[in-house]
Amino acid sequence: MTESAATGDDYFTENPHADVAAEAAETTAGAENTSPGTVEDIAEEVRDEIRLGHVDDDVSHVLKERLDGAGISMRPEDVDELAEDIERDVSS
């Protein structure tokens, strides 16, 4: 063998799964950036879907489901008020 031949130790790192963990973290961060994260983002998404005719249910119900799915907790009165604002915006 020559001196340029690599040994088995050259192929291993201290943490052999570091690249897998880093890739998983990047994927998670990317998912967070593509999903609606704020109340206003969700409200705008619901407005757009109403305009397109994709929302047939009660707007408050749809809005509550979207907020819950994003991990956002709001008082029912606030959800109802925001739903009314969305309905007003879409109808004008």
Image (cartoon, helix red, strand yellow):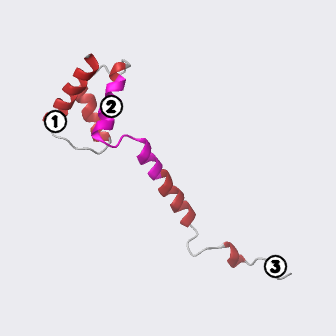
Report the magenta residues as a range.
28-49
Q: Looking at the rendering, which quadrant does residue 88 occupy?
A: top left
Return the disc, 3 or 1, that comes first in the chain's sequence.
3
> For the point 13% across and 34% down, which residue is it?
77
CB under 8 Å between discs 3 and 1: no
Does 81 appear in magenta?
A: no
Secondary structure category for the residue under label 2: helix
Q: Where is residue 19 in the image (x, y as percent from the top left)?
A: 57, 63
Q: What amino acid is found at the position of numbered circle 1 in the picture?
A: Asp
Does 45 appear in magenta?
A: yes
Tell me the number on the disc at residue 4.
Answer: 3
Which of 40/26 is in front?
A: 40
Q: In this view, does 61 lie to the left or right of 29?
A: left
Secondary structure category for the residue under label 1: helix
Q: Position of residue 8 (x, y in %)?
A: 71, 76
Residue located beneath label 2 in the image: 44
Main structural element of the magenta stretch: helix, strand or loop?
A: helix
Decide: is 31 above or below 16. Answer: above
Tell me the number on the disc at residue 78.
Answer: 1
Decide: is 26 above or below 39. Answer: below
Return the disc, 2 or 1, that comes first in the chain's sequence.
2
CB under 8 Å between discs 2 and 1: no
Q: In this view, does 3 lie to the left or right of 7?
A: right
Looking at the rendered image, the disc whose residue lies closer to the viewer, 3 or 2, is 2
What whole-number distance in Å separates the C-alpha atoms at marks 3 and 1? 69 Å
**Residue 53 in view, yes or no:** yes
**Residue 58 in view, yes or no:** no
Q: Position of residue 41 (x, y in %)?
A: 33, 37
